[in-house]
């Protein structure tokens, strides 16, 4: 038996009904690309254009633990897409850094890191993908998730802000006044 509100009834046809746990329902949303994931990233350089969509083919090299943008589909390559918007720019050690909001349309291994690095804009502190900044870890922060609530289907979006530490504090005015 199930507790009221602890499962979801899925009707595939008039004869077939499935009961899904909340975890299974969320998992299904992820697999069907209905689960939204948003991030803040600090990248080296000025992002041009300041808003857009990045589309690449990414190859995940499991031996090196790294993803690479490649020119065409082949075995082991997957299409990757993300949407971005530059929120602010600042000078850091004589170079421009940019605060970027990112929404994933696909969820690939190291996708955000690889796609910006392929455009010569590695994430600040991400030595694996080309950053020389040593004053912070990889400047990538999961700031929001959106999904349909397992019970009732109401759209839910949960946001959080990055810590007030480097490099996020460089963009305090843009971030914490959102």
Image (cartoon, rainbow, N blue to C red):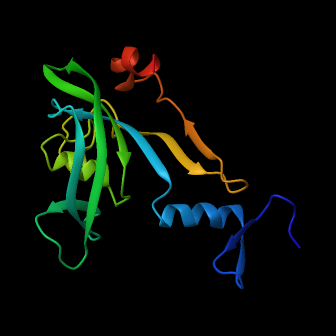
Q: Position of residue 58 (x, y in %)?
A: 23, 63
Quarter in which the C terminus is drawn: top left
Q: Residue at x 45, y 60 (%)?
A: 33
- Viewer-proximal residue among 153 and 176: 153
Q: Horizontal and vertical percent for residue 158? A: 57, 39
Residue 91 vertical placement versus 20 (above, below):
above
Outermost residue on the front side: it is: 14
19 relative position to 38: left or right = right
Residue 166: which quarter of the image?
top left
Q: Is residue 90 left or right of residue 176?
A: left
Q: Measured along the vertical axis of the image, is residue 147 above or below residue 78?
A: above
What residue do we see at 26% from left, 39% from top? 123
Of the pair 147 and 23, the residue shown nearer to us: 147
Instruction: Using residue 98 as the reference point, say whether residue 31 is left or right of it.
Output: right
Q: Residue at x 64, y 67 (%)?
A: 24
Residue 54, x across and y down, in percent: 22, 49
Name the quadrant containing residue 130.
Answer: top left
């Amino acid at each position: 038996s199930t507790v009221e509100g602890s499962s979801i009834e899925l009707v595939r046809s008039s004869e077939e009904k499935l009961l899904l746990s909340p975890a299974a329902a969320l998992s299904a949303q992820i697999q069907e690309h209905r689960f939204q994931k948003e991030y803040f990233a600090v990248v080296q350089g000025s992002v041009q254009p300041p808003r857009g969509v990045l589309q690449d083919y990414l190859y995940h090299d499991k031996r090196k633990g790294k993803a690479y943008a490649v020119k065409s589909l082949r075995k082991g390559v997957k299409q990757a897409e993300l949407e971005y918007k530059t929120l602010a720019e600042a000078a850091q050690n004589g170079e421009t850094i940019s605060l970027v909001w990112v929404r994933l349309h696909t969820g690939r291994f190291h996708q955000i890191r690889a796609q910006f690095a392929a455009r010569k804009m590695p994430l600040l502190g991400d030595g694996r993908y080309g950053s020389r900044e040593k004053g912070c870890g990889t400047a990538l922060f999961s700031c929001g998730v959106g999904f349909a609530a397992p019970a009732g289907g109401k759209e839910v979006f949960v946001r959080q802000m990055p810590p007030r530490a480097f490099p996020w504090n460089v963009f305090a005015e843009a971030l914490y006044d959102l």
